[in-house]
Amino acid sequence: MTVPTSAAAGLDATAIRADFPVLAERVHERPLVYLDNAATSQKPRAVIDALQTYYETYNANIHRGLHALSERATAEYEDARSRVARFINAAHSHEVIFTRGTTEAINLVARGWGDESVGEGDEILLTEMEHHSNLVPWQMLAKRRGASLRYIPMDIEGRIDLEAYARMFGPRTRLVAVTHMSNVLGTITPAAELIQIAHQHDVPVLLDAAQSIPHLPVDVQALDADFVAFSGHKMLGPTGIGVLYGREALLDAMEPLFGGGSMIRVVELHQSTWTVLPYKLEGGTPNIAGAIGLGAAVDYLQTVGMPAVTSHEHELTEYALSLLSDLDGVRLFGPRDATDRGGVISFYVGDVHPHDVGTLLDADGIAVRAGHHCAQPLMRKLGVAATARASLYLYNTAAEVDCLADGIARAKAFFE
Ligand code: PMP
């Protein structure tokens, strides 16, 4: 296996690293090796500066003020919405609803769309590899409405059986809610095919794109997607901001989740009417700074270029899979072939508890995650209570993957 150089992917990882202040930190007197990107990503200076500039020079509430600061804040907030819309190629910027993150976006659909459209005896199709965020809201909806959840057959590496999936549709199928990339296995699901099959039955699809949009070019129109949920903090943006993309007609038909300021047209003592998209679904003062920060994050990713981000991570994933599979007693989860997977690598080291592996790696300055990764049903399917997980992003390097492999080998030796 040749050691990948980011240059081949058209991406200068050294220059990129210089844009991320935290990457210069030392942890336990070692250089930080940050491999917990599936949990949250680091932030480039451009994003930190955008937040600071907002707070230092034009902090104001939006949409309501007639003064200069409010007008500027409103313009920047709406500009961020347009940038996000362009980033995912939405047909209209009002199809981008700002939320707190993926979790809120999915709950918004489960309440605002689900309560209207799902009834007694109806079915929602999911997979067993969903993050709890794309599982629990549907369980709650099913309980409220007397509906049921059905699971699309998939193998142990998260590959969906498309023929079995196509056979699951019936008159009671109301929605497919599926991850675009597993946060445990790294598997990329065939979103276009899943959507196409669902549309043959007039069933909408919600894509949990929390792990895909930060790492892959995603075009919601090319996918013919209905709902797409993602989080700013996993794509170089701040925490507390995320997106629900929805097809205009679907969002229009949705009931708001939050009643309050900004989302109304007329309020009377006993009833109210709602304003237009996107405001109808953004009741209350939104995370103005967060949206502006997300706009800056999207700019940063677009300047680097999403195809370059994807191919850089692809090279590193291939390299990591080859190094880790050469290590004795290390069990890897997810597809071995890097073609249909992203840079999320779950592993188990001998009989060592993943938390102990995580603690030993931390002592070497290497940040990974250990646990059930909010995917308990998948853990049960894999036959483990937890895994350790390393996850890559555009600023990671082959040298850091070497550190990970060395760290795992040391952890294993320590417990032998
Ligand atoms: N879905 C997936 C696949 C995720 O990886 C995550 C975050 N770990 C979420 C949903 C939830 O995202 P958030 O906590 O930002 O709402």
Image: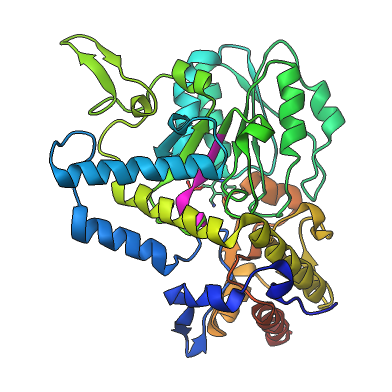
Q: For residue 101, say whether it is visible.
A: no
320 over 247 or under it: above or below: below
Residue at 84% x, 76% y is 326
- Please indicate whether residue 152 sits to the left or right of residue 303 in the image: right
**Which image quarter is the C terminus in?**
bottom right
Q: Position of residue 330 (x, y in %)?
A: 78, 72
- Please indicate whether residue 26 sits to the left or right of residue 69 in the image: right
Q: Position of residue 336 (x, y in %)?
A: 83, 60
In the picture, residue 48 is in which quadrant?
Answer: bottom left
Residue at 63% x, 15% y is 122
Start and end of the magenta stretch?
228-234
Q: Position of residue 369 (x, y in %)?
A: 57, 65
Residue at 73% x, 86% y is 413
Does the magenta-highlighted stretch encompass residue 231? yes
Residue at 68% x, 51% y is 379
Q: How many marks?
A: 0
